[in-house]
Amino acid sequence: MSSSIRILLLSLTYLFSMAGCGGRAGRDDRPSLTLSGFGVFVDTQAVKITLEHDGLVLVAIERDGLQLGRVDAVDDNVNYDPWPLLAGGGLADYTPPAGLRWLDLSAIEVSDRDANSLELALLFERGKRAAMKIELVSAGSYRLAWTPQGEGEAIAYFKLRARIDPQEGLYGLGGFLDQLNNRGKLRAMQTELDLDTESGYNEAHVPIPLIIGTRGWGLFIESPYPAVFDAASTEINEVTATFGTGAASTDGLVFHLFADVNPLDITRHYFDVTGYPVLPARWALGPLVWRDENDDQAQVENDLDTMRELDLATNAIWIDRPYASGVNSFDFDSAKFPNPQAMISGAHDLGFRLALWHTPYLDESDPATASLHDEAASQGFFPPRPGLIVNGWSAPVDFSNPDAYAWWQDLIRRYTDMGVEGFKLDYAEDVVVGILGARNKWEFADGSDERTMHAVYQLLYHRVYAQTLPSSGGFLLCRAGTYGDQLNGSIIWPGDLDANMALHGAACTDGDKEYVAVGGLPASMIYGLSLGPSGFPFYGADTGGYRHSPPDKETFTRWFEQTALSSVMQIGTSSNDVAWEPTAENGFDAEMLDWYRIYTRLHLRLWPYEWSLAVRISENGRPIQRPLGLAYPGLGIHPGDVYLFGPDLLVAPVVERGARQKVVVFPPGIWIDWWNGESHQGERSETVDAPLDKLPLYQRSGSIIPLLRPSIDTLAPTNQPERVDSYATTPGILWARVAPGESSSFTLFDGTELSQDGSSSLLLLGASTGSEFKQGFFFEVTNFRHREPSSVTDNGSLLSKSTSLEELELSPAGWYLDNDAAGRLYVKVPAGEHTIEVERI
C-alpha cells in the first residue's frame, strides 16, 4: 500500500471512527469540562478521553492510550530509562526489566465531579486500578493527575498514547538539530549515547516534554524522569510518551492538555503552568563578541578599542577561558590580566557590558583551585555519591545543598562586584541517567538522584548565577536546560556545532579526517526554531560555528546574516579569530568586514521591534523566531530554513554552500523585499537572487517595523558619547520602516504608538510618543517608486520637502522621496501625537 493511500485511510479513520462524522463528536451526554468552546470529554462507554474544540476532536486517548508498565518487582538497582527499551540505544544485548508487560485500560468510571473537575476510577488489565483527576485550569488548559492505586502489580513505567491527525506537524520537545517537524522521530528527554555523529551522544541538551500539534493542541508531561516521545514514528496517527519512573511510580504522573485556535498560542498555556520567561538584559540580545582563548588583558582592550574604531555595532563581550589562574578560581590570572578592574571599567567606558565563561567544578590537582576544592569537600559541598564524572576537573558542586549554594554565590560575587554582568555557563551535564543500560548512581544532599537531577541540576546551576545579576537583567548563555529554566532568563546556545554548512549527520571531511557532522548553520537554525515553541524564546548560536574552525568567508558571512535576524546575536568560534582579523586560513577580507558591519548594525537597529515582542511574551507566550509551519499551518510545510522573526519579517537565509539563489516560501499576503522594495505574492514559492552579501529578508505588507537610528553603536552606557553612539545616552529619534497596506498599528514596549493605513490613495501615518522615545519619528515608507506625493501634511499643516536625506535628518520636520531602486519616502516629525497624510498621485 502506498504511503499516500495509507495516510488517506488513516485520515478517514480519524474523522469517522475516532471523532465522529465530519470529525465532530456524535454524543453530547459525556461527562465533560468545557469553557469557551474548548473541552475535555470522558466517554465511559467507548473508554476514551478526548480534547475537543467546538466539537472537533484534536486528541483522543483510547483504551491503549493509558498504559501502566508492570514488572515483577521494582528494583532500585535497575535503570528504568525507556530509551534502550524502545530504541535499543545501540545495546544489542539489552534486557528489559523482568516481567515487563503493558497493562491496557479496560474501563473508566466517573467517581466524582463538580463544575471544574472530574474524578475518574480507572480499571486496567490484571485488576490493576488507578485514579485520575481532571481539572479545568482555564479555557483550553487541563491538568490531569494519574495515580496507580492499591497493592498488586508493581508499576515502573507510564505510557501515554494520543491519537492525532496523521498529517499534522509536531513541534516542541526541546532543541534538536535534524528537523524542525518532529513527525517520524523518536526523541529522548535525556542525554543518550549516539555513536553516529562525531560528538558521540544525542545532543539532547534542552529536552522539553511538551509537544504541539499544528491543529492547535499541546501535551505537556510535568515530570523530570527519563522519557521517550514517539512523534508518530511507529504509527503516523499516534504520539506516544513513555516515562520510566521506577520506585516513584506510586506518586503518579501529571500531564496537561492544551488547546487553542492558533498553535502559536499553545506556549501561553505552557507558561501558565511553568512560568513566563524572565527577560535577559536589553543589551544581552546582542551583538556580542568573544574569542575562544584570549591571550591577555591587552588583547581584550585592543579588541574593545578596535570595534569602536571600525564602527562595529556591539553591546558586549565575554571572555572565555583561560582568563583566571585556574578553572573557577574566581580571580584573574595576574600575569595575563594585571589590572582586571581597569579592563572592566574601560569596557564600560566604551559602551560594552562584560561577561565570563564558567562551570560548576573545582580541580583538586590545580594549585589555583585546590584550596577551594578542599574547602568544598570538607564542608560536604559535593554530591554525597557522585556518578561517573565526564569532565576533566571534578564532580559538580551540589547546589541542592543550601550551604553549598550560598557559598558558591559568595564566590560569584567576587566577579559581579567588579562589574561582570553575565556568564556563559558551560558543561554541567555529568548527571546522566544510565550508561549502557545500567544505572549511573548519583546521590545529592536533598535526597534526589540521577533519575530527576539529570534535568533539575540545570535549574539549580543556572539559578545560582542568575540571582547574582543586576535586577535590570543580565546575561546567562546556557548549553543545557529543562522546563522551568526560562525563569532564570536563560539564553540557549546549542553547544559545539560545526563551522560549516553541513546538515546534522552529513558525512564530512576536514583535511584527511572524515567525520559525521553534528551540524553547521542549517542545524543551528533548526535548533533555535525548535526551542521557541518549547518555551525558550532566546537563542544564540556561535556565529560561525565551533568544531573544525575557522569558518571560511562564505560560511561566516551566511551565518552572521542569519544571526542578525535571530533573537540573540553572539559571534565567535573556536579558532580565536574575529571578523576584523583576516588570515590565510579563514579568508576574511575588507569586503566581508563591510558586510559584517551592515548586519551587526541591522540586528541592533531591530532592537525596538524585538524587545517589544519579548515584552509581549508575558501576554501571548509567542516565540520571537517562529517556524513557518506553526505560524501558517494551512501551508502544510515545515521548512527549517525559512522562518518568521516576529509576525512581520520573513527570513530565508542561504544555508547551502555555493548557492546564490534561494527558494522562498511566501506565506499569505504580500511581502516586500527589505533591500530593494520589490513585492512578492504570498502562498507560493519563488526562486530569488541571493548573492553572498544578501540575506533574503521580507517585510509583510501592511506592517510597521520600529528601528533605532542608523548610527547606533550600543545599548549600554558609555562615558565617551562623542565617540560611541549609545541608546543609554539617548534613545534618539525613532525610525519606523512602513510597508503600506491594510490598516495596522504597532505598540512599542514603552507605549509608543505607530500606525499606518495604505489601503487607498491617501496614505495615513500615525505616531504618539511613549515613555522612552521622546525625540520624534522618522518614517521610512517602502515602494514609493517614481510617485512623488502631491502633498504631505502633519496634523493638517503642510510639511516641506527636503532636497536630500541628509538635509531632512538635520531638519526638525519634513519629507524626502529617494527615487533610487527602492523608492523610499521619508517623513520626519517631532515628538507628540501626529496624523500624517500623504497624498499619492
Image: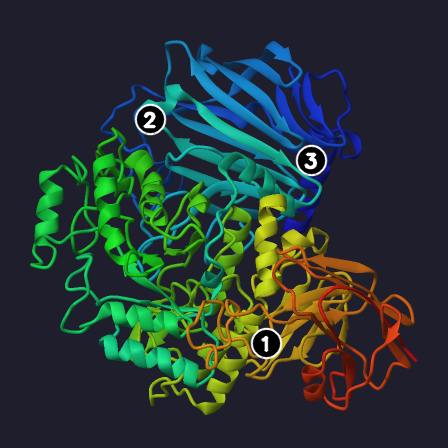
Q: Which disc is residue 246 wearing?
A: 2
**Looking at the image, is mark 2 or mark 3 nearer the viewer?**
2
Above or below: residue 317 compared with residue 807: above
Q: Secondary structure at mark 3?
A: helix
Q: Residue 14, how many percent across, how many down?
A: 69, 35
**Residue that label 3 marks:** 14
Say which quadrant the C terminus sits in.
bottom right
Q: Which disc is residue 263 wearing?
A: none
Badge 2 or badge 3: first in the primary sequence: 3
Query: Number of callouts in the render?
Result: 3
Q: Residue 271, how many percent across, how many down?
A: 54, 40
Badge 2 amino acid: Gly
Q: Tags 1 and 3 in contact by the CB under 8 Å rule?
A: no
Local crowd at mark 2 within 10 Å, few (<14), some, or many (≥20)? many
Q: Which disc is residue 695 wearing?
A: 1
Badge 1 amino acid: Leu
**Looking at the image, is mark 1 or mark 3 nearer the viewer?**
1
Local crowd at mark 3 within 10 Å, few (<14), some, or many (≥20)? many
Badge 2 or badge 1: first in the primary sequence: 2
Badge 1 or badge 3: first in the primary sequence: 3
